[in-house]
Image: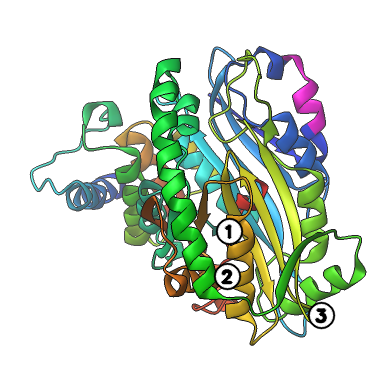
Amino acid sequence: MDDYDAIRQRVEKVFREVFRKPSLVLTPGLSAAEVPEWTSLQHVQLIAALEKEFALRFEFSELVEIETVGDIIRIIEQKSSV
Amino acid sequence: MKFREIRVGELDDLIASGWYRRQKIIPITPSRALSQAINPNAYPNDIALLMAVAEDDSLAGFAGILPARLYLTCAEPERFFYNSCWWIDPGKGKRASMPLFYRILEITGERVVLADMTMHTEQIVEATGRFRVQKPVEGIYLWFRGGAGTFLSRKSGYRPWVKLLASPVDLAINGMQYLRLQGMQKAAGSDNFTVRPASFEQQDVKAFVDRMCAGNPLTRRASDLEWVLRTPWLIPCKLCKKGAHRYPFSWKVESFVQYVLRIEYNQSLAGVAFVNFRDGIAKVPYLYVLPGSEESVAQALLLWMLRQPVHGLFTWNQYLLRELNRLNLPAVIKRKVYKRTAYNLVLSEVLDTSFELQDGDGDSVFT
């Protein structure tokens, strides 16, 4: 399993916990517009949970870029490789 | 979407700009901008306003930062920041909400105090895991006189006949209330405390304020209050025309008056109150009291208020609340209100968990 897949699996686990949807399957193109539960409050919870899971802090410039699940995985991948 | 940051020294340029004039919803009012430009706790390079601007150049969201000072014993005051506003356009601003909030945390080094949050903001703030959320403080909003006619006439969609109908009801209520309040005042008696208007030009008032807030790290000092008095954020304008601009927070009101009051016992200062009357409702942003005189000062202030042209009071001040209970002040309407506060975990290293905010902390003192 490469880094991308490993990160995707952990991101998926966080999504399932935050949105309380055990069967949620993430695709890179999935965005807030397609998940009704992905409100601004859930978005904060998601960011906080991802920060905890990956022991990192998102920066303003990164948060601005996030539109889809793929963006989240890419940013985490970049941060993890530094 | 673009994000713009406006520094304290750039606020006057912003409100004079063509972009500002073109906006339907503005990110800051001229009175707030002018006030924040001379904030004694700010530097010209401090960022005061963050804006999210949509592709069509209109405002998609904004958030404000109000620098303040934390007075710790035996040390120079440290800096911290109040979040003065956070607004998101429901359509265009969805993606702006979190970046704006996280940017505030970045800019301030996570030294933010949120002095009055909605329940929704409280949930968001708690979810970040970066704040200590305080237990909500219970306060009171009460009317000791009837004012339904005036109140209803301010509501949108108001019909003049509503005021006509409400006025006789108010009159009847106020007749009864007059007798009940007279009875209460007689029962309360007088313990020779006097209340009269003062000014911060009186050195003893200034010195008293600074002396009485020693040990309370957030409470505003006299220099701050002089600034607040000079630059209120509300514009009293009874006959204001509906302008081209809209601002999502308090701006234009029917009436707004600020008072500094000296409360004396035997001609010696026992309390100083910073009070304002906004559209017939009294608020007490700051009350500085000589230890041991809390009860008498609160009583004197409440009895003074009853003689003023206001019909109610909005407060979380613990001395006033205790005194309201003790006097059993007869109310026309009474309802509990809650103040939700939080501060960054970084500040929890220097702030005691039991510290008390006064009603005016945050930006409430201006409104």
Q: Which mark is residue B347?
A: 2
- Can residue B284 be seen here? The reply is no
The residue that appears at 50% across and 31% down in the rendered structure is: B150
Q: Which chain carries label 2?
A: B
Q: Which chain carries label 1?
A: B
- Seen from the viewer's position, the closer of residues B212 and B214 is B212
Residue A53, horizontal then vertical, whole percent: 31, 60
Give the distance between the C-alpha atoms of the residues marked 3 and 2, in whole angstroms: 37 Å
Residue B198, horizontal then vertical, whole percent: 82, 60
Instruction: Please report contact status of discs 1 and 2: CB closer than 8 Å, yes or no.
Output: yes
Q: In which quarter of the image is residue B250?
A: top right
Q: Which of marks 1 and 3 is in front?
A: 3
- Seen from the viewer's position, the closer of residues B307 and A39 is B307
Please tell me whether the stretch drawn in magenta is mainly helix, strand or loop: helix
The residue that appears at 77% across and 42% down in the rendered structure is: B35
Q: Which colour scheme is used?
A: rainbow
Mark 1 crowd level (few <14, some 14–19, many ≥20, 10 Å Cα): many
Which secondary structure, mark 1?
Answer: strand
- Seen from the viewer's position, the closer of residues B165 and B159 is B165
User: Measured along the vertical axis of the image, is residue B218 above or below residue B88?
Assistant: below
> Does the magenta segment cover residue B17?
yes
Residue assigned mark 1: B112
Q: Do labels 1 and 3 share a chain?
A: yes
Give the distance between the C-alpha atoms of the residues marked 1 and 3, in whole angstroms: 38 Å
Question: At label 3, which amino acid type do we have?
Answer: Ser
- Can residue B261 be seen here? The reply is yes
Magenta stretch, residue numbers: B12-18
Q: Which mark is residue B268?
A: 3
Q: Quadrant of residue B204?
A: bottom right
Residue B34, horizontal then vertical, whole percent: 79, 37
